[in-house]
Image (cartoon, helix red, strand yellow):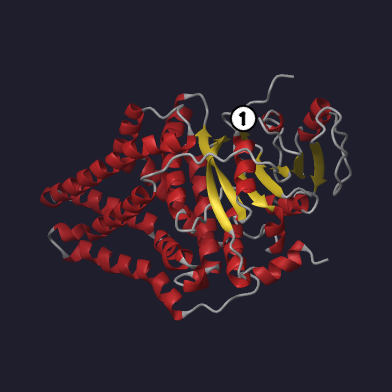
Amino acid sequence: MTSLAETLVAESPRLTPRRVPLASRLIGAIGPLLFLALFVQAFMRQSLAVWSIGIAYILYDTALLAFTAWNIRDLRQTPHPTPVTSPSFGVIVAAHNEASVIAAAIDRLAGQASPPDLILIADDGSSDATAEVLERRYGLAVPPLGTMTPPSAILPSLRWLRLRHTGKARALNAAMVQVDTEVVLTVDADTLLEPGAIAAMRAAFAAEPTLVAATGVLAPICGRDLQGRFFEWFQTYEYVRNFLSRHAWERLDSLLLISGAFAAFRREAVVAVGGFDPDCMVEDYELIHRLYRHAADHGRDWKIRVVGGALARTDAPASPMAFLRQRRRWFGGFLQTQRWNRDMVGARRFGWLGTAMLPVKALDTVQPIYGLAAFAILVGLVVSGRFTLALPILLVMLAKIAIDLTFHLWSLGMYKRWTGQREGLALFPALIAALLEPFSFQLLRHAGAVWGWHAFLTGRESWGRQQRTAIVAPAE
């Protein structure tokens, strides 16, 4: 039998490079070359054109908002009838030193309206009290390294696979070959599913046999202190926009971003493409590219979706440095994946994914640099006393804020109708967040992305230890 590692070699463009067409190279060069041309205008012009780079940034972002708005205009939750037969459903929880949250995650999974047939803890070499929690609370004896326990006498669906510490991707791969269910849900230990989440995922996979990967909808939770509430406030609305954008791209069969913190996969499809790539910073995102590639190569009509009725809450960064580290890894992994799959950019055989989504992603690689440069030029104009130029720029920015505000308030209603989520989505806080974000949270997000460029170019990336701020262990 071919191993996942051997299959990965054949399926991954990282390990078996593909020829990159000239058109793909040209599309990839547009963003950087245009940046240089527009940046020069800041030193050569004495009119609004001095801020050409900012205008380009605003026009691009507005175009993406318009695309999303058009594709979510009739959005509503898609009810799936209760299937006569449902695919077997397993959950893998990859965990490394998650003793403080592992019991909460397991209990939430076991308490689902439609509980999974299997909950497998893929213990990636934990050295904290994870073993004590699993033994004391669920009666699981510590298994030898590389082996899996029998089912728990307390929770029969629960098993524990104990591994050496080699990283999340390898832990998921090791667990994937141990699971025999048709659908496998990957859940981070710091992600708590809402009661109907697995039922919604089961129904989606039962209703569409060609569905091979689906993401649930995540909402961030941070600490209870003032700083935590501040970060949760901004990230909540960021997540709303991001998941609406994912639905918009799904309409073109071009959804790429599946959140590994809460994602379901047809197991045979993951095995067919070699599992998760342990050398990628964002193994969940990279896997989706290989699923699309495999489908195009083998004539498969595979679908990838976002399931609006499958909701979960995930522990999110609650401090500036934690947030920057997260976005460094996310953006660095995005750049990594974009480079490996650059032969897909502009390629017609991948449909809208190749001709629309991936060219947009090529431009996204430099969008944060555009944003920071535009802000720096504006600050420079103000500091140098060139207020006659700063004023028209400010008017352009106010027009952009008005557009964003209109979209965000309208889309909030669409999101509520789609997901059924109401908590934490009041209109007045959304209004204030939309007004403040361009001058605060958005700059922090761009800074994290630029740090991701550094991680990508130097190859120096470590995820580090994220402090859990919002999820606590359940009482014994």
How far from the left and from the top, in percent, is residue 240?
Answer: 43, 40
- Give the secondary structure at mark 1: loop
Q: Residue at x 44, y 80 (%)?
A: 22
Left or right of residue 265, residue 399 in this image:
left
Q: Is residue 172 something that shows in the picture?
A: yes
How far from the left and from the top, in percent, is residue 344?
Answer: 51, 70
Kindly give the residue lying farthest to the front in the view shown.
84
* Depth order, front residue of 186/439: 186
Q: Residue at x 44, y 28 (%)?
A: 424
**The C terminus lies in which quarter of the figure?**
top right
Q: Quadrant of residue 235?
A: top left
How far from the left and from the top, in percent, is residue 366?
Answer: 39, 60
Q: Quadrant of residue 472?
A: top right
**The N terminus lies in which quarter of the figure?**
bottom right
* Depth order, front residue of 350/363: 350
How far from the left and from the top, in percent, is residue 328?
Answer: 51, 51
- Which residue is identified by label 1? 195
Amino acid tagged 1 = Pro
Q: Residue at x 64, y 37 (%)?
A: 198
Q: Residue at x 88, y 41 (%)?
A: 143
Q: Is residue 126 something that shows in the picture?
A: no
